[in-house]
Amino acid sequence: METQDPISTQNQEQAPDNANVNTPEATPENDTPKLSAAELLLQRLQARKEESFTQIIDEVQKEASAPTPSEKPQPIDEPSTAAEQPVDTDNADILTADSPANNQEEEEAAEPVEDLDTINYAELSKEGLIEALEKIVNRDDVHKCKSYVDYIKTLFYKQINADVEQQREKFIENGYEPKDFRATPDPLEDKFKALFDQYRDKRNKYNEQLEQEKLNNLKLKQEIVSKIENLINTQDNINQTFDEFKNLQKQWREIGIVPQADAKQLWESYNYQVERFYDIVKINRELRDLDLKKNTEQKIKLCERAEELLLEPKVVKAFNELQKLHEQWREIGPVVAPQKEEIWERFKKATYTINKKHQDYYANLKKEQENNFRAKTILCEKAEEIIAKDYHSRAEWDAQNKEILSLQQFWKMIGFAPKKHNNAVYERFRSACDKFFEKKREYYTQNKEEEENNLQLKEDLCVQAEGLKDSTDWKKTTDILKRLQLKWKTIGPVPRKHSEEVWQRFRAACNTFFDNKKKHFDSIDKEQEENLRLKEQLIAEVENFQSADSDEKNIAALKEMQKRWSEIGLVPISKKDALYDRFRKAIDMQFAKINIDEAKRNEIKMKHLIEAAQTNPQALDKLRNERDRLKSRLDTLRQQIALSENNLGFFAKSKNADAMIESFRKKMEKQKEEANSLQSLITNIGKAINEAAAKSDKKN
């Protein structure tokens, strides 16, 4: 936009029509300067070139505030909506002095409506937006609400499109082809369309009435111009003529606007006839001076009102008010000559300042839009960089998906680009995003067969796990389930719509088994703690055993204690060996006090070992060693018996020989008894070893 002088002195007395500007609809104004998201992004990228783009984006998103409702953020989904069009800063220039502002419809639509301006439409749901639109439709001044209706429409369809996109993503994630997608109609959209049609009908009706009114006004004003011309030509009674002239001027001011195409020519005709009246008609000085004085007072009031507008913080509002003052200035006739220049300079000065603010506002707006364009171009390049790469796993695609969504979110925080670039840069960004999601869909489509195969493998593991969930073979089943869990981890992804379901199925089967196992061993732990207490009491009882007079009673009592020990059951494995050693030492100590032969001791000792071997692998090894020792002893005894039987044949018949033979026979009998006892022990030990080994195999 070229820099122009905010005011022209082409005609000092005539109103400076170059104050009039094509005001954009509902242009937002920032009362205080604040860095936008685009400016923050550009600054950070310039200062921190080596840092991660994603990190910078995240920081700026946190620091930059989201757009306020009055800023009307541009939704990504509807670039063609009227409310989304950026302000055309290149055409926000000053009009020429012969172009009076006459577009009442645009002025009314551009001015804020107080009770509507306080509503934060961006926070409303679809239902809330429909309710807001319905209230506007029922208003009498619906023609003033165009910017609000356009904004409501933009927000409503932004939510509609977001819902459709969510449906599309879910449809594709469930394994269906994108081309088969059909959105489910939103019933709220029909209600919105019906209300919007009502609004459009009321607005069109108003415009039709306005155009007819303009034509009527044109006809009336043309008649006034003709009547003034007739007054100039008649000049009968000067006082009466002047009164008629003033009455015609009053009628002119009271008549409303005329069609834009006729406004310039009509104004020139009217102004020409007014000037002719003052120049040609010879009115008396007193009456003329009175009229000039009245005009002077009116224009001074316009100067005061223009100066008040200098304090208005909203630039566009002040500028629009200035338009009306200039219209009124033109309607007022000449002023007294001495004050003519002073009044005009005063009004021109206020006009210049307001116009300058208006130009600066659009200059800043243009700069902001250029920054927005640069920032959006960077986002386009980043999106294009993402789609240029290949990704080979779900994790990679998910990571890049988050990047794209982050870029889209940041895009919404940035305002409009210049009008000549806005649609192009938007299409560039949207195209890059569309290509990314298309490539992502192609990847998932290509891997669909593999995922279906993975699903079958995981369902097979579910079947196996479910078959084992009620097992009570704790160790074996635990090992099998752990192998199944390791195998599960080696299988790739499955279709997303089945992923959670199949995982929960497998997990439930595993949890059922391990929960049952925990309950079982929790109960065993409590039982073993009780057994530990009972066996410690029994050990104390053995250690404090008081011998009776009869060895047989003592042996019976100790055997009863051994039997009670066996019946008590298992104790915690960490204390089992130490506890058994204490019991064995205590029981051996008590048997040592009793006078019994070696065979009996061996029998008692073996009974201890056999009982211990049922639950203790170490005792089982001791039992095997003891069996080997007894076998060796048995072999020795059998050799001695055989040798003794052989030697008996060499003894001669004599008195002394008979005594010796009898001694040998008794010795042999004892050896045979011991051999039989050893054989019985070895047999019992063998059975105990086999039983203990069988139990151990069953547990494993």
Image: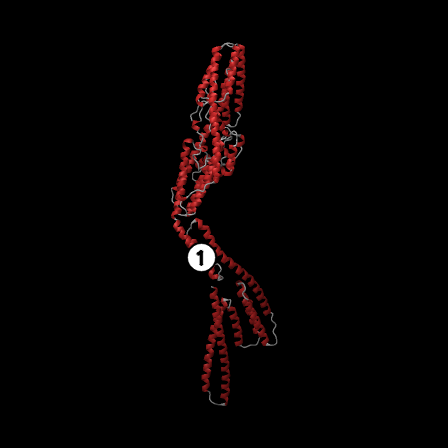
Question: Which residue is under mark 1?
Answer: 463
Which residue is at 48% across, 56% downward? Answer: 509
Of residues 323 and 615, the one drawn nearer to the viewer in this rendering: 323
Quadrant (top left/top right/bottom left/bottom right) for the N terminus: top left
Q: Is residue 519 left or right of residue 51?
A: right
Q: How is the image coloured?
A: secondary structure
Is residue 108 visible in this depiction of the protein?
Answer: yes
Quarter residue 529 falls in = bottom right
Position of 152 relative to 610 (above/below): above
Image location (x, y in percent) of residue 33: 50, 31
Image location (x, y in percent) of residue 312: 53, 26
Residue at disc 1, secondary structure: helix
Is residue 51 visible in this depiction of the protein?
Answer: no
Image location (x, y in percent) of residue 133: 50, 34
Image location (x, y in percent) of residue 459: 43, 55
Of residues 53 and 283, the one drawn nearer to the viewer in this rendering: 283
Of residues 58 and 72, the one drawn nearer to the viewer in this rendering: 72
- Outermost residue to the bottom: 654
Position of 310 relative to 526 (above/below): above
Count of picture labels? 1
Which residue is at 54% across, 30% downward? Answer: 114
Query: Which amino acid type corresponds to the residue marked 1 in the rendered image?
Result: Val
Position of 130 relative to 280 (above/below): below
Position of 159 relative to 225 (above/below): below
Answer few, some or many: residues within 10 Å of disc 1's Cα (few below 14, many 20 plus, some between 14 and 19).
few
